[in-house]
Image: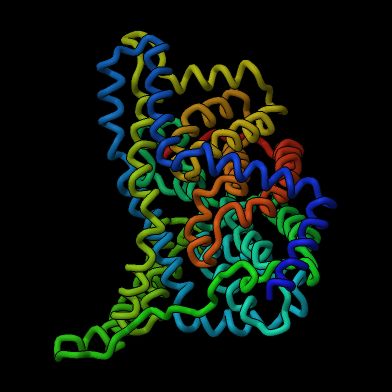
Amino acid sequence: MKELNRQQDLAASTADDAVGLERTAAAVTRWSEKWFPDAYIFAAIAVVVVAVGALATGAPAQRVGIAFGDGFWSLIPFTMQMAIVAISGYVVAVSPPAAKLIAWLARLPSNGKSAVAFVALVSISASLFNWAISLIFSGLLVRALARRTGLRMDYRAAGAAAYLGMGATWALGLSSSASQLQANPDSLPKALLAITGVIPFSETIFLPQSLLLVAVLTVVSLLIAYRSAPGAERAKTAQYLGVSLNEAELEVAAPSRPGDWLEHSPLITILIVALGSVWAWHEFSTKNPVLAISNLNTYNFVFLLAGMLLNWRPRRFLNAVAKSVPSVAGVLIQFPLYGGIAYMLTKASAPSGLPLADHLSHFFVAVSSHASFPALMGVYSAVLGFFVPSGGGKWIIEAPYVIAAAKELQVHLGWAVTVYNAAEALPNLINPFWMLPLLGVLGLRARDVVGFTFTQFVVHLPLVIFMLWILAGTLTFHPPVMP
């Protein structure tokens, strides 16, 4: 074993010499792990920066503080909705039918490199429906592939491929926080709704230009995943990395008292799912299905029903929910800060002056044009996304001045949301915040996979910015729709 490890280390070293980009990524990862604090700190710093910015525009300190407090709880409905997105996705992904599907899928790839590309395809495809399912399901698929005898797959590259849905396409799919927010006026803070209006899915994720962007990103991501994965002779397997592949099932102990019977009987599950299905049928049969699924409450309701049904017994469903909760800790504690930031941006101003959001929108109008705005905003949003790694929370911060500037420059408002979505996903490839649930499943550390995701980032960044710019010219501005 020691000799095998020595040979693998030598082969890996040779590969690193041949691919300088991976060495650079490893160095960047080591630096960030040493110097970058928890994502909560970035959100807290953003609060301070926005408060200082509001004061700099002449807003009295009292108004800034009041705006922060008034906005702190303004995102409670959306915070709960996004927490349920993560929980329901996890519950579906760890259900017994999903486990059988994973076992079947794991038999398909013929070699280690194709297995990595296959994981990338599954991750990207699942992310268009639910980002949490994409993370957990893809991670479990990697573990199943790693258990295959004779399949020498680089476990790190496969782990990075499992993250591509979150790093490339999730924000262009049904669980896109910004698109969901804009399609649901009840989820938006009133101050923001007055600026943006309602922007339905037909103007964001279902735009032909947006679908084309998804297709291009999918093909490019798969090619990079395949080409960057080490071959069999250089692959570092899960066993080599010391990762245990023994699966810990969601324990469901046998009933020990009469009161436990209902927890282990599918009767309650069947009744609740039947009741919920009546409502879901009515919702989708009486409305345009696209409009129905764009309602975040409907979206979450359907996935929770699916989670109940797929786990079958209430006790197993509850165990899956309990296991999923740690993955939403960041959402629960950071979103209130984003609500406070949004209010400071839009409500804190001098008695006869403009709020900070208006100053920012005027700045972007001054430095950009109708043609350059999408590319400029894409770069800005990607940079900000590294420090505020939350699609919904960051949109609350950006939307007031992004949409105001887009309206003034006559940029298609739905495309402005798509610009945000595509650019917002980019920093996920190098920021470990959303990697945490996946890394927990894989038993890896961020530095094990960032070398591969950084390679994707280097290619995605110019490609996404170029497509956001070139496709914007094919769209026409429409005034916002007010509820």
**Compared to 343, does 146 lie above or below?**
below
* Image quadrant where residue 32 sits: top right
**How many tags in the picture?**
0
Q: Judge whether residue 288 can be spotted in this image.
A: no
Residue drawn at 48 percent across, 72 percent down: 93
Q: Is residue 126 left or right of residue 247?
A: right
Residue visible at 81% across and 60% down in the picture: 227
In the orientation shown, which residue stands out farthest toward the right?
18
Q: Quadrant of the N terminus?
A: bottom right
Query: Looking at the image, which residue sits at the far front?
Result: 2
Q: Up-down: is 197 above or below 425? A: above
Q: Which quadrant of the figure contains the C terminus?
A: top left
Q: Is residue 242 visible?
A: yes
Q: Is residue 258 left or right of residue 232?
A: left
Which quadrant of the figure has residue 190?
top left
Residue at the image point whose x is 62% and y is 74% from the top: 239
Residue 231 lies in quadrant: bottom right
Colour convention of the picture: rainbow
The spot of residue 362 in percent (x, y) is 54, 17
151 or 355, nearer to the observer: 151
- Out of 459 and 78, give the one closest to the viewer: 459
Q: Is residue 139 above or below residue 23?
A: below
Judged from this view, the residue extending furthest toward the left is: 258
**86 relative to 444 in the view: left or right:** left
**In screen coordinates, is 30 left or right of 259?**
right
